[in-house]
Image: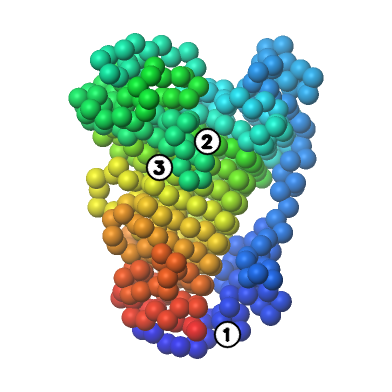
Amino acid sequence: MSVARRAIDDIALRVLSRGFDEYGFFAKPADFTPTLPCAFFRDAAGDIQHDMDFTQYTGGTALYVNYDTGNDTSGDGSSGTPYKTVQKALIVAEAGGDAAYCVKVTSDTAFPRNTFWRSTQYSFTDKTIAVIPDNTSGRIIAHYGETTRAWVADENVWKSTRSVARSVFDMDDLDDNGLPKPYTGVVDLASCKATSKTWYTDETYVWVNTADGLVPDNAKILVGVGVTNIAVLLGTSKLYLEGITHIGASNNNDPLSIRGDLTGASTVGHFVAKDCNFLGGNLVYAATSAGNAIATAAVESAYFFDCRAAYGRRDGFNLHYSQVTTNDRRGCLGLFYGCESYDNGTADAGTGSDNAFTSHEGASQLIIASEGYNCRGPLLINVNGCYSIAVDCNMRDNVYGGAAYQFTTDTPGGGGDGKAILINCTHDGETLSTTDLNTDAAMAVYLIGSDLTNVGSGSVVTVR
């Protein structure tokens, strides 16, 4: 159904016509229940800005880390005698008695395997934890590679002993965002030897065909070991990450998983990422069947500002709420501002289920001025009856050829009837067409700033 100039619930038409009130501030519908962490407003140029205060997360007890000069044994975390690894600082923060800790990284050297995260999960209760750069580059690089790997020649490729190899990144081969791209994982050694920028593993050895044919430099050719890094946020805990490039490797799970209370006893957890890059190691050899670039589970609030998720084996940004009781799911919020998600699932031989942005189980999502592209599946897809609001978003170049936007109640476990409001959203930078949006009959979809009519079988209302 398509109806012009129709009042929707209790949202005033003047707000619907632009998505913002007469003062230029975003005005969320009254039935969109999560509290927003900041105001969003249009500037004189028409761009959406925000007034988020990130300093609220960084005022805790400082713990200094310097990979080049620090020492995890003799260091005490002070600026003069720092720890060597972020892992050590997080262990101290986990066990410490203070309410808040700010881990400040003063070196520019990348953190290899088991120096940023650890092999077992962190669990924080009623604490605020921040990890931020305090270095020349303004960035922290964390990856799963090992700096001591030994390589031997095997005809035109290079061979090393390594089980559970799950990704290979080339730090000199950068994409348009300046981020390293993964080599292509292939299913046999012959394919590896035949093609540059590929790798293969038989679970005992790993082979790499480098771009220049030279022996891999362990600081530049990163062989990622499959492991899931987990941070559990209980009680009032908050985790804040800033300026981090996280270069992952999927081992039938997500390389980075932020979790709340998985018992379902409480709805907790507050995760914030600012200017972070989450890379999933997409082109993993065929035996691996899972892995998103960044995932959350049962986290009440997950906020991403100016972040990128790329090269996920499955999805880029993936938010789940199945452990949250049904009545509390609508109050959970996934927030994206100025984010990009791309090249996810491109090695997947499936039928188009790998996405740029996705939320599940009837939660709420607000996505602003964000872009998804080159994924094997709908680019922005929220299922199980989520309440979704997208503003000034562009979804383009979805590899599998289906709808760019999808909002459904097609599987059990949702939090009630779903709803989606799209404000000034586009596909490939153009006004939405009838093939760009897929819904089901239980969804209510409202399009603002679009002339789209008669989309799918859901109830679609166009408000001009």
Image side of residue 400 versus residue 390, left or right: left
Please name the colour scheme applied to the rendered image.
Answer: rainbow
Q: Which residue is mark 2?
A: 246
Image side of residue 76 versus residue 228, left or right: right
Q: Quadrant location of residue 444?
A: bottom left
Whichever of labels 3 and 2 marks the residue nearer the N terminus, that label is 2
Q: Nearer the viewer, residue 197 or 139?
A: 197
x and y, in percent, of residue 300 in the image: 57, 52
Q: Nearer the viewer, residue 91 or 341?
A: 341
- Circles 1 and 2: CB atoms closer than 8 Å: no
Q: Which mark is residue 155?
A: none
Q: Which mark is residue 13?
A: 1
Q: Which mark is residue 312?
A: 3
Whichever of labels 3 and 1 marks the residue nearer the N terminus, that label is 1
Tell me the quadrant of the picture where the N terminus can be found: bottom left
Marks 1 and 2, how far apart in space?
A: 43 Å
